[in-house]
Image: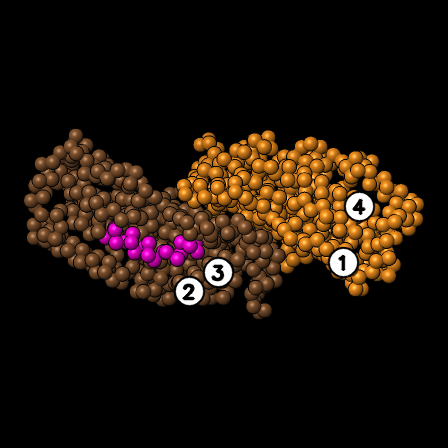
Chain colours: A orange, B brown
Amino acid sequence: MDQKANHTNGQPTRRAFLKTTGAAAAGIALAGQRTASAAAEKLAKDGGPKAVTVDFGDAAKWPLYGEKEEKAIVELLRHPSYDPIKKLEDEWCAHFGMPFAKAHFNGTSALASMFFALNLPPGSEIMVPSYTFFATITPMRLFGLVPVFVDINPRTLNFDLEDAKKRITPNTKAVLPVHWIGLPADMDLICEWADEKGLIVLEDSAHAHCAKLKDKYVGTWGRMSIYSYQMSKPLPAIEGGMGMYQNKEDFERATAFGNYEMPGIPSDSPVFKYKGSGFGLKFRMHPLAAELARCQMQGLEERNAAGARQIRRLNDALTQLPGLYEQSSGRSDMQRLYYSWNMLFIDEAEAGMSRDAAVEALKAEGVNASALSYTLQHKLPLYAEDEWWHHKPVIPELPGSDQANATSIALPYFTKEVPELVDQYIKAFEKVWAHRGELA
Amino acid sequence: MKRFRGKESRSMSRRTFLRNTGAAAAGATVGGCTTLGSSASTAVLSREALAMDGGAASVTVPKETIAAATKWPRFGETEKQAVWEVLDLSASTVYRDLPVLEQEWREYHDVPYAKAHYNGTSTLTSMFFALNLPPGSEIMVPSYTFFATILPMRFFDYVPIFIDIDPRTACFDLEDAAKKLTPNTKAMVPMHSWGLPCNMDQICAFAKEHGLIVCEDAAHAHGASLQGKKMGAWGDMAIFSFQATKVLPAIEGGMGNYQTQEYYERAAAFGHYEDPPKFPENSPYRKYNGTGFGQKYRIHPIAAVLARKQLAVLDERNAAVRARVRALNGRITQLAGLSEPYCRDDMERVYYSVNMLFLDEAKAGFTREQVLKALRAEGVSASSGAYPEQHKFNIYSEEQWWHHKPDVPKSLPGCEQVNRSCIYLPLFYEDLPEVTEQYVRAFEKVWAHRKEIGKA
């Protein structure tokens, strides 16, 4: 945890100080005048002036397409071809230093192809978080694979390795962590454990294009990984997906599954004899999407970094407030990015008010805050019905996932520099927190 | 459109007449209306050296002009504008064109339900899920088709029965189907090859008699009709592909038509995890909100706007292409041994990708290879190529992929005949009357030399 200090500009130390000396005293000592003045101001919900007066405008506009994209699209409409797909794959491999990549029509089809590539016997189990999009899990059933639902750490929203350790069975063959909204899962620890247990490591990097752990891109830790290029994603192509593969065999099977023409597959490959038919699905990416993805790759890491910097400024201030936390694993060896939301968590006891009260007050101040509850896959009917599965998945209790949903406060991810808005958000939070006694 | 049918039927009866009276005599008696028919011009042409023997090529219109006129797909300012607008949309508005496309599609086909999917294959996969048949159910399909008409079945433990095509039409051979019916047969999926409608009236009557569900693979036949009813409106379900080469191109895209709410809901729920809450309260599929059934088949919004724009000009384009094909085929199919797929008077066909002709080598007196060589030398973009016969692919012969191993026929003579005899000409999307004349001349010239070519 000491590494966190580097990453968050000394915040944990201050935080530790707050915790040891008592929140009230520290609040006065550190925030001093500001808290006092914030407390004096009437809450907007009680008729006081709003803290946020700047127009939100296109602060969270996404995706950001410009002339580059328009030009590329027009050119392709003029001369339609599938060439951009291969170009994107080559550029993707080069960027990540990976031997194999295959574009698919979306993240779900990339996942389905990955499950086919696994070539595991029916009944094999794969560990996945329940706190994820259905596509991380549901395509398994087409291949007789069965999910083992694993909890998340409620403060990282990522795969909880300790929970996974409790749920392993003799049938467990693979683990599939997700890097939730751009925060890398603990791939080093997960890989180490998987190695020990003989499990295959897969990655769902749908939210984490170019995030890093120990200077190594997520998506390059596992044997296979997938990306989504859906329009809300860090690399948006409106619809699109990519798979990355360490092994030739995986690449060939994943490609063959949805590409009957067997592009890039040599004639001595065991799947080559299925050329012309493939295995029943067609997952070719829309070439216009490939062109958009190629354009968006340019400047991706700079965009990610700028977005993260702005969030640091905001969150460094907000997480000073008692009972308010951000989604973080506290590791300084991670280079995360943000996608869609800036996720905070409230500890109601520590904050001295309920999440609902805080969110309501924040909204009144003009903050786009919401009490977000993400769909937990294990609670959906499809997983509880025998007929869809080789054997019925175990539907567990997942307290970490429940806690995340009970405590999260989602703020928008600002996709452009909005310093004034950031200041006013900080002010709004401080004001609400200054009144938390009465909000209780 | 009656005009084209009229012409076609005239040409058919002329053809019948030709056959009855013998080609040579007919050339003299009936050929008056066309230059090719006259024995005088045949005599003249036979004295002209073939281009492959050093004579002048018949087609002199520059290659670039022909390339421009045969280019497909064709996107213009309208499409560019529409795509730019999509690029400016946000997450909450970007999918706005999808339901609009579906509505326009329903209205165009006069069907109660339609759902856009990512491509034709995903539309077929969703359709097979919608069928909801017990494992081991058999479905009749032509072998002469793209893999997607058949192979997604295996995800639902269905088994294909390979049906031959009628060599005169390259479409589903109902007589062959009648022979192959088993107690496990539950459905059939005829495919309208190259835009020519299958005999849906007869197929539907047969299906009704035997309690079979009818699905249509209309991937090639956007806007074609039989007895005034569109392809895709005959079956209980139907699919379309919007792939780049198709009659309605969106580069990648697909659409399903559904006659019942049950089919629609299952097909939509399969690959659209957000659709179930839109279903009525009593729908058994509402509860699968958030998962669907494991796939995500949303059409690319750019593809959806391309499809909308292309739908707006579909009929006009189909009619123009048809007129050009008629102008050419009406004349060259007078030649001995050269014919085109038979199109009923009550059908309005469309053309997908190629103008397919059939060569009867015995009647023509030379081989397909010989004629293609001579035609190409004359400057005609003539080609041949075997369309896949699915039953010959390995995956259908391997038990591991199927509920039970499909019966792989030793041969399907109709498929073989079509693949042995077909000649493809390009479709023209611009008016180039001089090319038509020159193509006709090239064919006539080659045919005038057919004895010597046949001897070579």
Q: Which residue is mark 2?
A: B107
Which mark's residue is nearer the viewer, 3 or 4?
A: 4
What's the chain of the residue with tag 2? B
What's the chain of the residue with tag 4? A
Q: Which segment is the magenta one?
A: B307-326
Q: CA distance from mark 3 to mark 4?
A: 46 Å
Q: Which residue is mark 1?
A: A50
Picture residue at 9% right of the left edge, 52% below the top: B32
Discs 3 and 2 carry the same chain letter: yes
Q: Secondary structure at mark 1?
A: loop
User: In the visual, does B214 lie left or right of A125?
Assistant: left
Q: Secondary structure at mark 4?
A: helix
Q: CA distance from mark 1 to mark 2?
A: 50 Å
Type of amino acid at the residue the image marks with label 4 = Ala
What's the chain of the residue with tag 3? B
> For mark 1, does the 10 Å Cα neighbourhood hold few (<14), some (14 to 19), or many (20 or more) residues?
many
Look at the image and tell me whether residue B217 can be seen: no
Type of amino acid at the residue the image marks with label 3 = Val
Q: Position of residue B89 (x, y in %)?
A: 55, 52
Q: Secondary structure at mark 2?
A: helix
Which mark's residue is nearer the viewer, 1 or 2?
A: 1
Q: Position of residue A336 (x, y in %)?
A: 70, 39
Type of amino acid at the residue the image marks with label 2 = Glu
Discs 2 and 4 carry the same chain letter: no
Q: Which disc is residue B100 wearing?
A: 3
Q: Is residue B78 above or below residue A356?
A: above
Front residue of this view, candidates B409 and B265:
B265
Picture residue at 11% right of the left edge, 51% below the top: B31
Q: Which residue is mark 4?
A: A317
Q: CA distance from mark 1 to mark 3?
A: 40 Å
Which mark's residue is nearer the viewer, 4 or 1?
A: 1
